[in-house]
Amino acid sequence: MSERNSNCVRIGFIIGKDGEDVIHSVKNFKEVPNKYRYGNKIDIDVAIPYYIKKHYAVTIDIIKPNEVTKKRLLKNDLNFCIGFDIITAKWLKDDFPGIEKRVVSIFKESKKYKVYPSWKLQNFVYRKGSYLQQFAKSGIPIAPTILIRSKGTFGISRVKRIVKKIEKAGWDRFVIKPELGAGSFGFRNMSVEEIRRNPKKLLDYLIEHYKVFPGFILQQAMDGFTKFWELRLWWYNGKFAYAIANKAAVATGKDEIISKNPPKKEVEQCKRIGRKIFALLPKIKYNGTVSKPIMIRTDFGCCQGNTMNKNKYFLNEFELQAANYFTSHTPFPVIEKGSLEYVKKFELVTGKKVKELK
């Protein structure tokens, strides 16, 4: 649905959140239709477009996942994936048969269909196992990682070869998760000794998922996750914006714990690591200018070497702008600052100026 102002600038926003990243207050968003709300709640991927509409001379086009078509995207000057990506599409395939294949085919031609981020950057981020190994070669600290591709056949003999790799790495326990898996889906924490005695347990897991996912990420189980905060840092156009601390349910064994006051010293440590990542990302140019991603979220865990040294955080993963912003868990003005960055990126990518409303 398009929301018009009297202007010729059209910005598409592809949304996909379902009440998982709601804003603090909806009192300034009375104009948001019920179909974009969850009860009386509004997600960040809807709030930012409506804030932009209210403060800039633009027409916004709110695009739900099942509405992503070539014809729809071509109507806009640029289309931001603000709450939707290929991982989201994978989880919606039962509700909308064929959506993953259709969206992938469109996003692969991101320039033609005016999709931001570019497919080159999107595809880089989706391959967590590959980029982690690449980052490690460049000196970025990560959890020791083994990548298993969903190719060939899976049998007991292959599982035994995987176990030998793990043993060679010196791990007692490992975690495994499908590549392109969202959240904690498919996350398992396994004992090497247990799999050695009963390789069928790992085999059953691989057989359950290998036809759906391109591979599996195996990492040494890091004990620090149960004691220390996981730190999430947001960066707008390459500059640090804000951070929160959390302990996931898989770490607490109960409910997730979130703090809007992360430990400052550890955040500074992670900022030093995070700044190094931008030089390792695919170089994307718009109008002759290399452009950093509009937003990335870097997630860090503790501790390198599986010590319990809180001065040894490592990069766990990073995500682009469709990730959760944890909007209601930070005093940072996510909507206001985020909206400005989207407008600035629109101007850079399209070469069109956006007029601010007074």
Image (tube, rainbow, N blue to C red):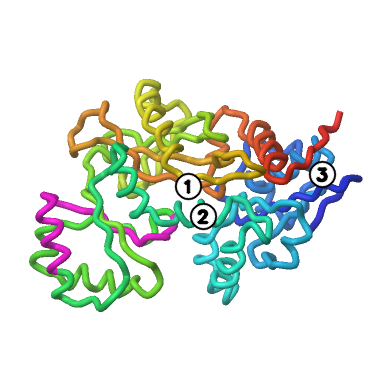
Residue 129 is situated, as x and y percent measured from the top left of the image, at: 33, 54
- Residue 157: image tag: none
Given the image, on which type of amino acid does mark 2 rest? Lys
Residue 263 is situated, as x and y percent measured from the top left of the image, at: 38, 24
Q: Earlier in the sequence, mark 2 or mark 1?
A: 2
Given the image, on which type of amino acid does mark 3 rest? Val
Circle 3 Cα neighbour tier, 10 Å, few/some/many (<14 / 14–19 / ≥20): many
Q: Which residue is mark 1?
A: 282
Q: Which residue is mark 3?
A: 58
Mark pair 3, 2: CA separation: 28 Å
> In percent of the image, x 32 and y 73: which residue is there?
208
User: Residue 179: within the magenta?
Assistant: yes
Residue lying furthest right in this view? 6
> In percent of the image, x 40 and y 40: which residue is there?
299
Mark pair 3, 1: CA separation: 30 Å
Circle 1 Cα neighbour tier, 10 Å, few/some/many (<14 / 14–19 / ≥20): some
Q: Which residue is mark 2?
A: 120
> In the rendered view, would you say 239 is above or below 122?
above
> In the rendered view, would you say 25 is above or below 268?
below
> In the rendered view, would you say 3 is above or below 207?
above
Comparing labels 3 and 2, the label whose residue is closer to the camera: 2
The magenta segment: 160-182
Q: Earlier in the sequence, mark 3 or mark 2?
A: 3
Given the image, on which type of amino acid does mark 1 rest? Pro
Q: Quadrant of the N terminus?
A: bottom right
> In percent of the image, x 20 and y 32: which residue is there?
308
